[in-house]
Amino acid sequence: MVRGLLLLGVLFLVATFPATWLLMLFLGNVDVHVSYWGALPLGILASLLIGGATTQFD
C-alpha cells in the first residue's frame, strides 16, 4: 500500500512537470521568480485543464 502511494506520488509529479516547468519559465520572464514547489499548484490546475480539454465525451 505504501509503495503504491509513493509510486502514485512520483507519477503525479512526473505528469504535472511539463506544465509546471512552463509556468516557471513564464513567471520568471515577468519577474515573479518562484520555485518548482511554488508553481506546482498552478501547474496542477493547468494539467487538469489541458487534460479535460483534450478528452472526448460521448
Image: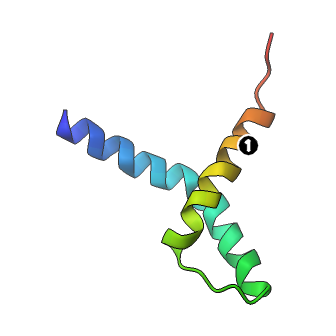
Viewer-closest of 17 and 30: 30
Q: Quadrant of the N terminus?
A: top left
Q: Give the camera-side residue of 40 and 6.
A: 40
Type of amino acid at the residue the image marks with label 1: Leu
The picture quadrant where one finds residue 38 is: bottom right
- Indicate whether 36 appears above or below 47: below
| Quadrant location, the C terminus | top right
Residue 14's x, y, as percent? 49, 54
Vertical comparison of 27 with 45: above or below? below
Residue 10 spot, x, y in % from top left: 38, 51
Mark 1 surroundings: few (<14), some (14-19) or many (≥20) residues within 10 A:
few
Residue in the image at 26% along x and 36% along y: 4
Q: Residue 39, percent across and down?
A: 59, 68
In the image, residue 25 sits, relative to residue 6, either above or below, namely: below
Q: Residue furthest top?
A: 58
Residue at 66% of width from left, 42% of height from top? 48
**Residue under circle 1?**
49
24 left or right, relative to 26: left
